Amino acid sequence: MAAFPESLHLVLGEEELLVERAVRAVVASARAADPTVELRRIKVSELTAPELDEMLSPSLFSEGQVVALEAAQEAGKEIAEAILAHARQPAEGVILVVVHSGGGRAKQAKELPNALRKLDATVTECRKIAKPAEREAFVRDEVRRAGGRIDPAGVSALIETVGSDLRELSSAASQLVADTDGRVDEQAVRRYHQGRADVTGFVVAEKAVTGDRAGALEALRWALQLGVPHVLIADALAESVRTLGRVAAAGSNDTYRLASELGMPEWKARKALGQARGWNRAGVAEAMRLTAAVNADVKGQAADASYALERTVLRVIDLRAR
Amino acid sequence: MERSETGHAPDPLGDVPSGGPEPATGVWSEIVGQPDAVHALVAAARAAALRVRGESGDTGAMTHAWLFTGPPGSGRSVAARAFAAALECTAVSGDTPGCGQCSACRTVLSGTHADVQVVVPEGLSISVSEMRSLVQAAARRPSTGHWRVVLIEDADRLTEGAGNALLKAVEEPPDRTVFLLCAPSDHPADIPVTIRSRCRPIRLRTPLAGPIAEVLQERDGVPAESARWAASVCGGHIGRARRLATDPQARERREAVLRIPLGLQRFSDVYSAAGELVRLAEAEATAANEARDEAEKEELRTAMGGGGTGKGTAAATRGANAALRELEKKQKSRATRSQRDALDLALMDLAGFYRDVLATRFGSTAPLNHPDCARDVSKAATEWTSETALRRLEAVLECRTALARNVKPLFAVEALVATLHQ
């Protein structure tokens, strides 16, 4: 058992797919050395310290095992200390994988990752992918893993139509590579995927306040089709109108000053300033009334919330044109 | 919910109290400026006492279900509690039940009498499950007192299902059970017609400034001048008058609200004024709930064995987390309601201002809602037309409706202030 992998692993982050992969990778490398290795997973919150001791003791017949401690951020003081004690003196043939979200309530649980790092744990970062650029990089990596290549237009088309769920993106990527000869471009994506996966209320609102009638209606229909709650769309509409109203009322073109005065990020102020063109004061006031009214409509006042939203979007666009 | 009384000033030409001598002794002294209601309730309490003793008397005076209606702050729940105390009163001397001295009276007024069930909804509504368990309790015979009393404050917060559950009990009441419901009005929006038709109404009027000022002086020890001031600006709301007289922050909040009508110069003022209004309401709600929320949480944690060590504590804590979440949900509902109530008070002050402007423009001699803002009011009355004042008043009232319909407070208030600015 010479080529056994490191006996202490820390999987840090919340992105489920990546966490799963990291655990599998550890198991795979352990099995490469010893095919009889077993994987045992258990949630930390279901454990007591003595049970943990038992799990992490070397087995009588010295077969190897991988113990994955899931949700380590919920560990209490005792468990956290027990984990660290084992990490300091690992038993032979036992590989410990601590899966930790990075957060945690108890003090010991929060400090667990750092303590494990100090003990030379192999760390795999699995942070939630939130930024568009990271998601694009993920898609490119997935296609490469499946043995294909994808161009930037293909990446954005795939994200637009499949959405932001990593599992779905991953399976779509490997499927596309299998369906094509490995070269994935926008055309290939469009051949297999149609429609839009992600339309938020803010996309609808943005198109409405900039007067894009066709675009706003299309986005609204897609959003409703995809099951975006009516309330979120109504809130986004009201929020957009009030933001552009506030920016316009402040009467300044200096986006940095606006941002600090109104307590919003600079990009938001810049965007709202752009949207404010074509609006006058009376129009904004009327749009505020409309969006407040539709807020009640989507919360049970209107017989048909979808219709109420559509009517409000159209009226807001009319107000801008005036 | 309280949509029936909107911005009405105390009516100076209110009807003269009819009926016999008004006993202002014992528990009845709690009821401020409501001679008619007290008269009817005393008669009922006397008849009830006779029935308990097995004697015949004015049999029509007592009944099994009562509906107390009146504008907010007129003392609906106070009147209902006083009546409950009179029903349970054990004093033998005198012919007016409700001495306020015996242990039954005192326990009812402090809310600990075994036979008086009080429902005070702290959340947004009264649920059907809550009502079902209450109905069950109502079916039992009184244990220590003469009557089993079920008192529901804010019966307008009954959900439809809860109302129906209650209806069954009100329809066929047990012999010695009395239901006391309180609601802003007997409008179907407030109380289901099916329940209303089975209750005897007690209508409370808006108390006049005089009696309110007296109560503030006598019961709360407020100096005469500030008592008179608070009574004159409270719009007939006794609790609000007390708060204004005793809490400087409440006074500041009111002043901030009343600065809005003449303070809207530029369009950007709309956003700052609306933000301020909502922020004040939030601050008021948090101030009212914060200490209590934390104390409740700590209590629950201790009860669920928090901080314990040893085998099995992890499992116990998991159960505790669920209970804690449940409590947090309840507290959130309570916070939403206090915030909404605080905002509603602010809107009522605002509506009062526009009503004053209208009254001044028409040359009415009716007392103003905000006599201390008379200068602002007359300035506005010369600058605005009646039409714009009315339009603004209506916008305020629409905003109240919108808030009751769960519109996000910031959106509703901003839309309102945008209208006020125009």
Image (tube, grey):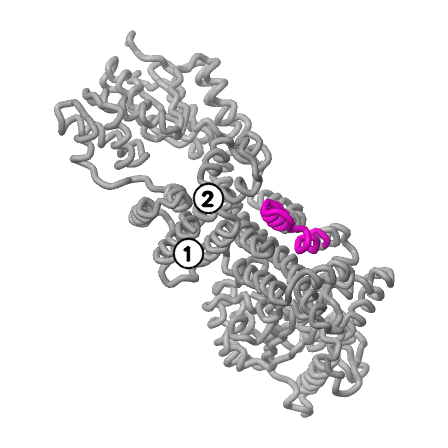
Residue position marked by numbered label 2 in the rendering? A240
Q: Is residue B380 magenta?
A: no
Q: Measuring 63% from the left and 50% from the top, which residue is drawn there?
A: B277
- On the question of residue B74 being in view, the answer is no
Q: Nearer the viewer, residue A61 or A156?
A: A156
Amino acid type at circle 2 is Ser
Relative side of B104 to A75, left or right = right
Say if mark 2 contacts mark 1, CB within 8 Å: no
Name the residue rendered at 17%, 30% in the picture: A188
Whether residue B69 sits left or right of residue B46 in the image: it is: left
User: Which quadrant of the figure has residue A170?
Assistant: top left
Q: Which residue is mark 1?
A: A298
Magenta segment, which residues? B255-279
Magenta region includes residue B260: yes
Please tell me how crowded label 1 is: few (under 14), some (14-19), or many (20+) other residues with Cα within 10 Å. Answer: many
Expressed as whole percent of the image width and height from the top left, the position of residue B419 reads 56, 56
Q: Chain of mark 2?
A: A
In primary-sequence order, the first of circles 2 and 1 is: 2
x, y (%) of residue B393?
61, 64
